[in-house]
Every structure is written in structure tokens, then in C-alpha cells.
Image: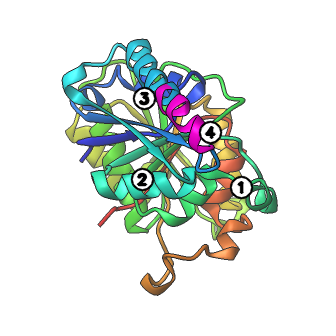
Amino acid sequence: MLKKILFAGSGSGPSEDLLKVLLDLPAVQSANIDILHVVSPQVTTEGVTEKWEEGNQLVAQTMKNLNLDPSKVTTIVRQGEPKDTVCQVADETKADLIIMGSRGLKRLEAILGNSVSQYVFQLTNHPMLLVKDDIFVRKIKRVMVALDKSPASQYALDLAIFLLRGYPGVELILARVNPDLKPELLPLSKTETENNPIIAAAINKAKVQGINYRCVVTGGKPAEQICSLAEEYNVDLLMIGSPDRRPSVARSLPDLDRLLGTSLSDYVRVNANCPVLLARTNS
């Protein structure tokens, strides 16, 4: 499920800190990691050699900082537009997960600011793990999965369980935000929460792997409530399903509605106060 990771963030920063804490997880320790650095296409002919060497030094420094096993790491230096290059390399390497930093730009700002992470999120069909530049990355102790009826949500749950099995001291928070749940019915009792069909199925999966869990079911606007719950439970990693709803004919073009930030995934990407893993099947 997680055999190949593309780390598109050579150099210091929260994305490197995030990969460092992920390497505590047995599931990540067994994965192969590709470290990508992109040299700008605007570099002059005279400056290409210098920038290429600088890129090689950065990826080598990243390997050293993370104490990575060289036999499980491939370093990649490419020249091109960063946003296009990340998508291309993810496809070439069949990445199971892309890890990137993000400025957390909102809506139109992401377009006008030429956001690489937003562009990659928009056009790739690979799962992405994003961490904003202003977030302090902590050791992973609490992971929340936002659950709904979509296949992408179930993939997020399966990926969370895969990541956490065999990792002691972690808590998996199973969260269901039902926008049709009337306020007068809240809060639900423990029995009512655990009997929720979506929660009950998730509990069974967690129990099979011996993962400690807690459950929450609430109502309201899903995107806002997911971010609120992540803050309330002091979550170290938030995982949500992010289905690719574009028809295949449009996958080479940005979907303007999603670029403008109208999707749940985009709202959470911008507003969550922790790293966010946007899960989608890459088939």
C-alpha cells in the first residue's frame, strides 16, 4: 500500500520534519523514497551547471539529515516547471504518496501565487501529504480520519490503519461529520456513536489490527467541523478522502471550482492546523 514515497521538498523545513517523524512508523521505514529537487527552467545556460550541483547537494543533505538508508533512496534532480515536474515524476515512479510543503494559500491566492502544491493536488491522482510552512510538526501520537461513504474515505481509513499498525502509543480518532444530523440530537451517546454504520465498520478494522481508537460523530458543515475536531483533539496528522471527480478528458486541465477552494479537501488543506494527508486511489 505504501511502497514508494515521493518527497518533493529537498532542503530544510516542515516537510523534512514531517518525513523525519513519519520514519518512526514501521510502514514508512520499509518504503522506498525518491527525493526530488527541481531546477527552474528560467536558469541561464551558464547557470545550469551551478544550479544542478546545488540541487545535488540539497538532496544529499536531505538524505544526511534524515539518516536514510541509501539502498532505499533514489535522488532525482530535474529541470523544469516545479508543478509539472512533480506530477510527471509521481507518475513515472508510481508514487503511493507525495510529500510536499505548502504555503496554505486560500482560493484565488493559490492561482495568482502560482502555488505548486495546489497545482499538484489539483492534477495528480496520487495521495498527497501536505504540511503548511507555519506548522510545528510533532511526533505522531494522534491521527484523525474523517469518514464518509466515499471510496476515497475508506482508502484513507485503510491507509491510516496500514501506517499505524505495529506502532505503539498511537491513537486513531474515527470522525464522522453528518451534515444531516440535527443539532437537537447532539451530543450522541457512546453507544449511538459506535453504532453509527460508518463508525462501526471502521472500529472493526481498527480492532483487527489492535489499534487504540476513539470515535466522534457530529453534525454541521463537514469541512469546518473536520478542522475544528482536529484542533479540539490536538491531532498530529489528519487524513481525509479526496476523490478525483474530474472526467478523464479534463484531467490535463485545472478544475476552476476546486482551484477556487470550493471543495472540502481544499478548505481542509488551507485551514487545518496540522499536516493533512489527502487520500485518493492512484489507479
Q: Amino acid at mark 4?
A: Ala
Element carrying mark 3: strand
Tell me the quadrant of the picture where the C terminus can be found: bottom left
The structure residue drawn at horizontal position 73% and vertical position 60%, both measured from the top left corner, is 183
Count residues near mark 3 (Cα–Cα under 10 Å), then give few for <14, some for 14-19, many for 20+. Answer: some
Q: Is residue 179 above or below residue 79?
A: below
Q: Main secondary structure of the magenta part?
A: helix
Q: Nearer the viewer, mark 2 or mark 4?
A: 2
Q: Amino acid at mark 3?
A: Glu
Q: Identify residue for label 3.
A: 171
In the drawing, does residue 189 fall left or right of residue 266?
A: left
Residue 136 image offset from top left, x and y in percent: 65, 22
Q: In the rendered structure, which disc, 2 or 4, sits on the residue that comes first in sequence?
A: 2
The structure residue drawn at horizontal position 34% and vertical position 59%, both measured from the top left corner, is 91
Element carrying mark 2: loop
The span shown in magenta is 44-53
Q: Are the residues at dot 2 and dot 4 in contact (C-beta closer than 8 Å)? A: no
Q: In the rendered structure, which disc, 1 or 3, sits on the residue that comes first in sequence?
A: 1
Q: Identify residue for label 1.
A: 114
Residue 8 image offset from top left, x and y in percent: 48, 39
Q: Identify residue for label 4.
A: 230
Does the magenta run of residues contain 228? no
Q: CA distance from mark 4 to mark 1?
A: 28 Å
Q: In the rendered structure, which disc, 2 or 1, sits on the residue that comes first in sequence?
A: 1
Q: Is residue 175 above or below residue 235?
A: below
Q: Nearer the viewer, mark 2 or mark 3?
A: 2
Give whichever of 154, 132 is nearer the camera. Answer: 132
Determine which of the numbered discs, if any, sits on residue 127 in the image: 2
Q: Are the residues at dot 2 and dot 3 in contact (C-beta closer than 8 Å)? A: no
Q: In the rendered structure, which disc, 4 or 1, sits on the residue that comes first in sequence?
A: 1
Q: CA distance from mark 2 to mark 3?
A: 22 Å
Determine which of the numbered discs, if any, sits on residue 106 in the image: none
